Image (tube, rainbow, N blue to C red):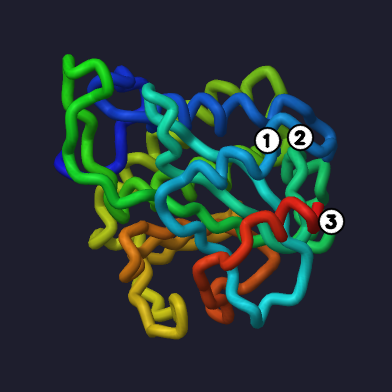
Amino acid sequence: MGGGPLRPGQSEEASGNMETTSQAVAQAPAAAGGQQVPSARRTVDGYLRAPFPWYGLDEAFSGPRWLMQVGTAADGAVEHGSVGHGDEPSVRNEYAAGGDNEARGKFAIVVTVAANPVRRSADGTGLLEATSVSSAAWLAGVGLLSFTWPGQMDHALRDDWLEQQTETAWVLADDLDGPDWSTLSLPVDGVPTTFHYRESEFGWVLAGSTQRGVHLGAYGRGMSAYGLGFAAIKDIGAYAQAE
């Protein structure tokens, strides 16, 4: 697809680290009933290894900030990761939460993806697909799904539902100019930037690019995306200390 999102299930040699990412996202919410998911959290060490700047909400956001996880390539290089803002989301279904946004929490999670061109894999046997705004959109879409599943769904069916919705997120991310997306201008490092934006019953997703060599994705619920601004994180350690 030349810089689009990576199809779930592609081999790591063919698709870089996105399969690893999708597995991590899908497996992280193993708990149910509103419990927190410690496995979705990582230390600051992985973030410090990244050769690119991390992004979060700008200084206008005064609420809690916290680390989530990083994604790595086959050679261990950090290629993307997420940081959270607001109420740390828990794994719960819509029925258990009563459909109440207050009960479900208010959060915005920012995904930073290094802008990588098509390149050879670490062992030299294949090509890794380029990352793009679509990559950020897919990671954000799957991230939102990982914390929510529909009301009255049997927990045993959730894996099948998540697999189907992950594929749907891939299709949507591959068509950012399609009718499912609108555009939204938000500040990035103080500069108005165009994002692709969509809403669903589970929350909202947006994706765009920065002038500093990374793509941004974001997802959330309970917090309006229209009032957000993004900025390079000056001290990623502050996110760890805030936990």
Q: CA distance from mark 1 to mark 2?
A: 6 Å
Q: Which residue is mark 2?
A: 37
- In percent of width and height, residue 82 lies at 56, 49
Q: Is residue 83 above or below residue 42?
A: below
Mark 3 → mark 2, Cα distance in angstroms: 17 Å
User: What residue is at 67 percent from the left and 49 percent from the top?
Assistant: 67
Where 162 sits versus 59, above or below? above
Residue 171: image quadrant is top left
Q: Secondary structure at mark 3?
A: helix
Crowding at dot 2, Cα within 10 Å, few <14 / some 14-19 / many 20+, comes out as: some
Q: CB atoms at circles 1 and 2 under 8 Å apart?
A: yes
Helix, strand or loop status at disc 2: loop
On residue 207, which mark appears?
none
User: Residue 103's mark?
Assistant: 3
The answer for how far apart the CA atoms under marks 3 and 1 are is 20 Å
> As shown in the figure, which amino acid type bears the numbered disc 3?
Ala
Observer-side mark, 3 or 2, equals: 2
Which badge, 3 or 2, is on the more N-terminal residue?
Answer: 2
- Residue at position x 61%, y 53% in the image: 83
Q: Nearer the viewer, residue 237 or 126?
A: 237
